[in-house]
Structures are given as structure tokens and as C-alpha cells.
């Protein structure tokens, strides 16, 4: 029996490729992974956004109009609905001058877990404590 901790770290913006969307999708899919574990084992994923990766989180982007692709906003809503822990690097929020209320809000959709803006040291701790770190 054990807790298998996974860290999904999104570090690239959604407009440079599929990796940010894949990071979110993989983090959401942890629920499927649980059926493959031994009895009593659980998966505890944490989705982290650092550097340019957090730029895709900003609400109300016009991705379809500007780039012809969907934004990650709906993906993030699903992430919050399944109560996945989502951490955003505080230093990068400040670096890019993004207001904290620019990120999807769990209460808007009836979810319980909100995005947390934390110092990079907290994200580093999550990565150190995780059995697997996946970079996107």
C-alpha cells in the first residue's frame, strides 16, 4: 500500500505546441491509472505551472479567433472539477504581471478546489516528493 505522487509540470505556453494541453490531460487521467494499481495504492497528482506555461491559464483568451485552436480554459475547468491540486508559480505570476483573479475560479463551476498561487519553493518540494515528475 502506498501513495504514488506524480508531478505534472507545464512550462510551455499552449500556442507553441500541444505539450501544455497534454500535461493537463495526463494529470486529469490519473483517475484511470488508479484501476491499474495494487489494492490500497492511490495516486496523488499535482499539476504545476511555471514560466511561460502559466500564460495558457489566463481566462477569456480568444484562442480560436486569434490562432484557430481552443484554449486550455475548458481543460482547466475539468481539472478543477475532479479536485486536482493545481499550483501556479507566484514569482512567474509577478514576472508577467498577471492579476490573481485572471485564473479560472472553481466556484464559477461548482468545484471545491481552486488554483493555488504559491512560491516556486513549494513547487520544488512537490517535485522532490513525487515518485515521477513529468515535464510538458
Image: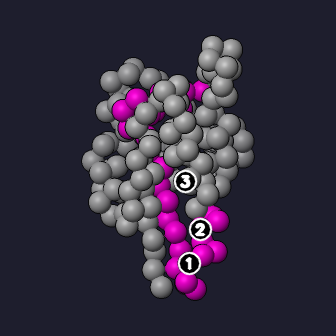
- Can you give x and y, in whole percent of width and height, for residue 15 in the image? 52, 25
Residue 134 placement, left or right of 58: left
Judged from the image, the secondary structure of the residue bearing numbered disc 1 is loop
Q: Which residues are magenta?
A: 31-59
Residue 55 is covered by the magenta coloring: yes
Judged from the image, the secondary structure of the residue bearing numbered disc 3 is helix
| Residue found 59% across the figure and 68% down from its top | 33
- Can you give x and y, in whole percent of width and height, for residue 96 in the image? 38, 22
Report which residue position mark 2 lands on: 33
Marker disc for residue 37: 1
Judged from the image, the secondary structure of the residue bearing numbered disc 2 is helix
Seen from the viewer's position, the closer of residues 18 and 55 is 18
Q: Residues within 10 Å of mark 1 (few under 14, many from 20)?
A: some
**Label 1, label 2: how far apart the Cα atoms are:** 7 Å
Colour basis: one colour
The quadrant in which residue 66 appears is: top right
Report which residue position mark 3 lands on: 27
The quadrant in which residue 132 appears is: bottom left
Among all residues in the image, which is located at the extreme front? 17
- Comes first in the chain, label 1 or label 3: 3
| Residue found 50% across the figure and 39% down from its top | 19
Is residue 107 something one can see in this rendering?
A: no
- Can you give x and y, in whole percent of width and height, for residue 64 in the image? 68, 20
Q: Quadrant of the C terminus?
A: top left
Amino acid at each position: 500500500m502506498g501513495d504514488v505522487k506524480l508531478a505534472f509540470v507545464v512550462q510551455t505556453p499552449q500556442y507553441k505546441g500541444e505539450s501544455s494541453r497534454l500535461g493537463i490531460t495526463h494529470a486529469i487521467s490519473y483517475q484511470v491509472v488508479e484501476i491499474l494499481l495494487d489494492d490500497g495504492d492511490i495516486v496523488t497528482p499535482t499539476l504545476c505551472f511555471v514560466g511561460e506555461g502559466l500564460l495558457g491559464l489566463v481566462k477569456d483568451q480568444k484562442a480560436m479567433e486569434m490562432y484557430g485552436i481552443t484554449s486550455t480554459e475548458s481543460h482547466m475547468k475539468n481539472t478543477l472539477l475532479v479536485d486536482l491540486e493545481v499550483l501556479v508559480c507566484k514569482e512567474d505570476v509577478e514576472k508577467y504581471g498577471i492579476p490573481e483573479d485572471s485564473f479560472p475560479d472553481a466556484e464559477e463551476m461548482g468545484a471545491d478546489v481552486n488554483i493555488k498561487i504559491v512560491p516556486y519553493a513549494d513547487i520544488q518540494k512537490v517535485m522532490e516528493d513525487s515518485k515521477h515528475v513529468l515535464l510538458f
